[in-house]
Amino acid sequence: MVEPADRPSTAGQRLGATESFGVSTLEPGLRPPAQPPGRLVSIRVQMLDDTQEVFQISQRSPGKVLFDLACVHLNLTEGDYFGLEYQDQRKMTVWLDLLKPTLKQIRRPKNTILRFVVKFFPPDHTQLMEELTRYLFALQIKRDLACGRLICNDTSAALMVSHIIQSEIGDFDETQSWQHLLHNKYLPDQDAIRDKITDCHRKHVGQTPAESDYQLLEIARRLEMYGVRLHPAKDREGSKLNLSVAHTGVLVFQGYTKINAFNWSKIRKLSFKRKRFLIKLRADPAQSAHHDTLEFAMASRDCCKIFWKISVEYHAFFRLFEEPKAKAKPILFTRGSSFRFSGRTQKQVIDYVKDSELKKVPFERKHSKVLSHSGMSPLSSSFRLQVPKESAMSVALADQPDSARLSHRAETNGSEEPPPVVASANGFQDIPVAPGSDPIQSRRNHGSTGSAPDQHLLNPGPSCRTNKGSPGSDDSPLGSPRLVVNGNGSMNGQGMGSDGVLGPGQIAEGQQLSPLTSPLLTEAGYVRNEDEEEARRKKFPTDKAYFIAKELLTTERTYLNDLQVVTESFQSSVGKDEAFPDLVQNLISSNYDPIHKFHQGFLKEVEQRLAQWEGRSNAHIKGDYQRIGDVLLKNIQGLRQLTVNLQKHSECLVELERACRSSRKVETLCRDFEQQRVCYLPFNIFLLRPLHRLLHYKLILERLCKHYPPTHDDFRDSRAGLADITEMVLQLQGTMMKMENFQKLLELKKDLTGIDNLAIRGREFIRLGCLSKLSGKGLQQRMFFLFSDSLVYTSRGTTPVNQFKVHGQLPLYGMTIRESEEEWGVPHSFTLFGQRQSVVVAASCASEMERWVEDIRMAIDLAEQSSSPSDDLLSTSLTDNKLSEDGVAEQESEDELCGSRSSLERQGHRGNTTVHVCWHRNTSVSMVDFSVAVENQLSGNLLRKFKNSNGWQKLWVVFTNFSLFFYKSHQDDYPLASLPLLGYSVTVPSESENIHKDYVFKLHFKSHVYYFRSESEYTFERWMEVIRSATCSSSHSLLSTRKELY
């Protein structure tokens, strides 16, 4: 910032004691900035470590002089990320304008204390080259936590505080740590999580203050409220909102939940008029030619101007190559504000530190009692950063907001302003514009010659990663191959997988990059040259085995969450009730708790292996950790010891059903639990999860063995693991098949009214779905249920739980079937001739008709093989209930099934079950389809985009039970929304849809269109495979495949 002088001194001497020191890269002994002549005035500035310094400035000095004096005092090179804020005479917090005279802004300097704070929050802390800068950012995070501005869940809060304490007092000592927490306030509600903080602290043994700063910033940057300064506003309807600005653009919050985001690429102009703040958006060529203008009302004109100014500065700092030039003053009249951004842009700061030969100078850590041994140099060849170690605790960093802490309101801060014009290429990311071209993003078109455009974003070679945006955000400007994005990731790109963590005690070697960064997709923020990008591409694991192992990790996380529904949520909600039988409670606890405990250890091993695989891919020893078969073999052998518990799971299901039948109170308890959001599937499905998981292990090992050549180091372990798991599946196949059928009958019983004893011995479910029944009033939609002994048809009732009312039963014994399209003149129709009646039905299409006819004929053969005709299923002896034949309850809208929150949160409503989905989508599903769906379960991070939006939103997605369930992160307890896939088609976007990204698939049903983007070719193919299993009904040829699996 200023020129060095010749006089020898050090920052440590200037600051006082050097008991605890770090390293800065600014030359020692700096000459203060030149000041204009005039009377000197004393100005007090409060630093981030709460010390106050007094600076002497000329009464005519601009704000930049005072700011430079503060940076000189700190020996701070990267001072451009910071600013001076103060309260003006209106009691409003404003930023010191660096171009205007200081005393024209601060009218009463003796009574004003300016605060030196972080002004621009980069999306990735690894863009901060100096240890001193990271230390100051850590102090800012500490302050934001203490005042309740940085809102997060208890786990993240405890982990961040534990890193702060580690940097201040060193390794864990129970007495010292406890006393330190008693005398220091880091959180508004610190006492409630004190034990959790100490538990986290004891895991940081050996971690230096610099490493603690690094880990603290790594956690903080993932939080939704990181760097957010809220400015109260209202929309046109008068709803209370909060506006904020970030490196990506303007954000809109409702309370502390982000509900919208306007990327710089979408914004044409920002302005304000009196109390109204205006955002003018670029025209979307696909929509209309006019420009949309959004209007927000703020408390006053001054509030508008403050927010406008900080918006202008954020845009210029993060998106321009260089400081914008001053406009020439008009001769006669002025129009509008002359305010402009003053200072270096982020690109200029990064380039300056990269290109300068800067020495390392000690600096004091005021609150730290630990000697820092950091020797970080900003001059290392790859990235100038030595990566600290981190324990596996870091995987728990959710960015989920904690409702308990939402009561602490974030302070409004800063001032903002808009760019001149920000160009956009097809709305997905930004392109440079003259004169202030975008230094961060330079887009390469998907089809351009000689480029590997967005493939680099998705293929974890030069992996780019998206930030954890909250649901509903459209602010992911996924950029070009030259940039590394930063929401969840590091500019280094040495990622760990979307969810990987560094194992306990593992330290990255040499100049290795952050072990906590994800190889998924992130938002833009850092310019990288082609040599760095090529080097990074070579370092990151791209072997197919790595992605298979990563699939094991992501599905194991989902599986463990499903087990917790049984072992924790169900037992705490239902098991503690006195009416719930102790026998059933003990049976479930004794047979599921050991399974849960075992898989907790298994998951930790997989997480550690993936962390080592990703974090050491550029180490000298290759192949040590680039394998997963040995981990699978070891744990499958351990799982075999729990075979007895797995065999008891069928007994748990039967006893629970028996308890529900014998006690209405128990039945009510179970039904109420199924309405809780954590129970996102029928509870009985969770009881089957341990057996289903065996099939997943088998399929994963089959893919590994197929991928590896016989000479591969991991082939032998994978083959041995496959043999063991195959033996277990064979041993439990009978139990598994019976439980699946029994569970399906129990689930159908909840959807049907007017049926007695559906789940009886010997009855098998075959198919359910929609057919049109021909009657005197024409074709009427009916829901048909095909069992091994009878065919039942129903209509959707009007009960509060929307059950299907049974109209009639057709015994299969002695039934014949005949196609009758020509006879009745109804397309895709066929006639069922029973012993007591005949029914004419029509399918929605030829393929549906073929499936129904095939299954009914097979069921007739099964019925003929039984000894006698089946008993009536109906609660009455009516062969055909004529009541309500002409009236079908009004359908719910399709939107209700397409991922709305209400469909998950509505109490007492089972409108998202497979039966209801088939009713709305006019399709059918068979038991074979259910069996195939059991094998095709998948979870992981995907980017989602709606048809009419430009932004990509990163979500944790779980595919199971013919539906996609969307979470903000894998640590969420329940899904935010769901999307049933029956009836959908899955394809690849066409050129006309302008989706210029790799690994994108499209889901389409009527007017509903969704795009999903995966990280690699392997994950893209896997998602396409499993989704096709739900959207394309299986034929009976697949049944033999499943039997071969056993």
Image: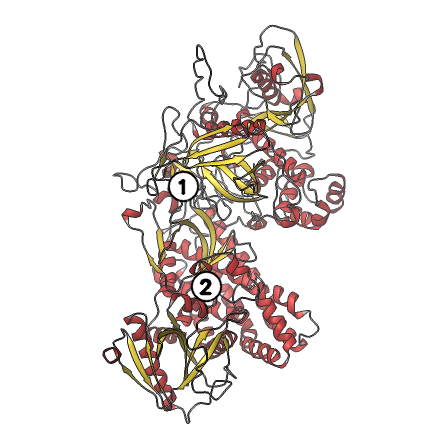
Q: Position of residue 321 (x, y in %)?
A: 41, 26
Q: Toward which corner of the image does residue 1030 lie, by quadrant?
A: bottom left
Question: Which three-letter amino acid code belongs to the residue tagged 2?
Answer: Glu
Q: Please indicate, yes or no, whether residue 979 appears anywhere in the rendered image.
A: yes
The reply to whether callout 2 and callout 1 are in contact (CB within 8 Å) is: no
Residues 509 and 810: in front is 810
Q: Position of residue 154 (x, y in %)?
A: 64, 49
Label number found at residue 892: 2
The kind of residue on which mark 1 rests is Leu
Quarter of the image for the C terminus: give it. Answer: bottom left
* 988 shown above or below 285: below
User: What distance separates the C-alpha of mark 2 from that of mark 1?
Assistant: 37 Å
Residue under label 1, please give it.
478
Looking at this view, name the residue that lies furthest to the front.
Answer: 777
In the rendering, at what x and y percent does residue 906 appear?
55, 61
Question: Is 305 on the left-hand or right-hand side of 46?
Answer: left
Q: Residues within 10 Å of mark 2 (few under 14, many from 20)?
A: few
> In front: mark 2 or mark 1?
2
Point out residue 841 in the picture as x, y percentages from the top left corner.
Answer: 33, 78
